[in-house]
Amino acid sequence: MARMYPEQIEGLEEATEGEKRVFAFLKEAARPHKDFTVWYQPSVGSQGRVPDFILYGRKLGLLVLEVKDWASHQILSYTPHHFTVQFSGKSEQKTNPLRQAKSYTHVLMERLREVSEFVSREPAHEGGLKIPVGRMVVFPNLSMQEYEDRGIRWLIPMEMVLLREDLDTAGENLSDASGRKFHQRISGAFPFGFKGLRGKEEA
């Protein structure tokens, strides 16, 4: 299994059912397991920002995952900035989760720029990060058909979302022992390719 911090979240009161499913999914799907580390609700930046998950893949980079337990019938409407979602008969306006994830990636990138080993010195990329930082939204309760029917894919593209079928224990991501399907599924969420950090940088 991938390295998980904390080792389990089943007993955590603040963990939603969707987050528990995503935790279990990442624990198994991120293969080869020695190449992956996952943090649940890590604090990033001085403002105490807390993304749902950050995944580090040695040959992929860092990936921020924002989990939303919303069912299709709860999503009343959406714009590039906000989703209007119904909870217990009351509608609430929520930040577009992809924009929410983007805000976390910006904070994370600023923190990484404070470490000189992570900053590129190559002329073509001077000042940029050596490690890519991507973002995805996870909708554990939305099927691909619902996602298509509601037109949400035009707002959050498929390469930046994980849906109910992706997390399915009998689905191709978990059925592939090599981890290639999982790699392929999330690789489009990263801004550039990555071959990994050298030993000293990774330490």
Image (cartoon, helix red, strand yellow):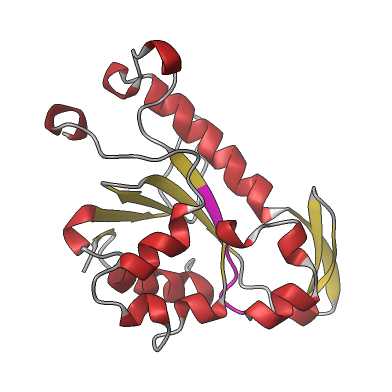
Within the image, what quadrant is residue 72 found in? Answer: bottom right
Q: How many marks?
A: 0
143 up-or-down from 90: above or below: below
The answer to whether residue 60 is left or right of residue 203 is: right
Magenta stretch bounds: 135-142
Q: Residue 161 placed where, x, y %?
A: 58, 62
The answer to whether residue 146 is left or right of residue 195 is: right
89 up-or-down from 185: above or below: below
The answer to whether residue 150 is left or right of residue 170 is: right
Within the image, what quadrant is residue 85 found in? Answer: bottom right
Task: From the viewer's side, name the closer residue of 187 and 8.
Answer: 187
- At 33% from the left and 13% from the top, the residue drawn is 121
Q: Is 162 in the magenta?
A: no
80 up-or-down from 12: above or below: above
Kindly give the residue lying farthest to the bottom in the view shown.
170
Q: Residue 180 placed where, x, y %?
A: 32, 66
Q: Residue 82 placed where, x, y %?
A: 80, 53
Kindly give the residue lying farthest to the left in the view shown.
199
- At 44% from the left and 54% from the top, the residue drawn is 187
Q: Residue 192 placed where, x, y %?
A: 45, 38
- At 51% from the left and 32% from the top, the residue drawn is 107
Image quarter in which the N terminus is found? bottom left
Residue 47 seen in the figure: no
Image quarter in which the C terminus is found? top left
Residue 27 seen in the figure: yes
Kindly give the residue lying farthest to the front in the view shown.
124
The answer to whether residue 196 is left or right of residue 150 is: left
- At 28% from the left and 40% from the top, the residue drawn is 195
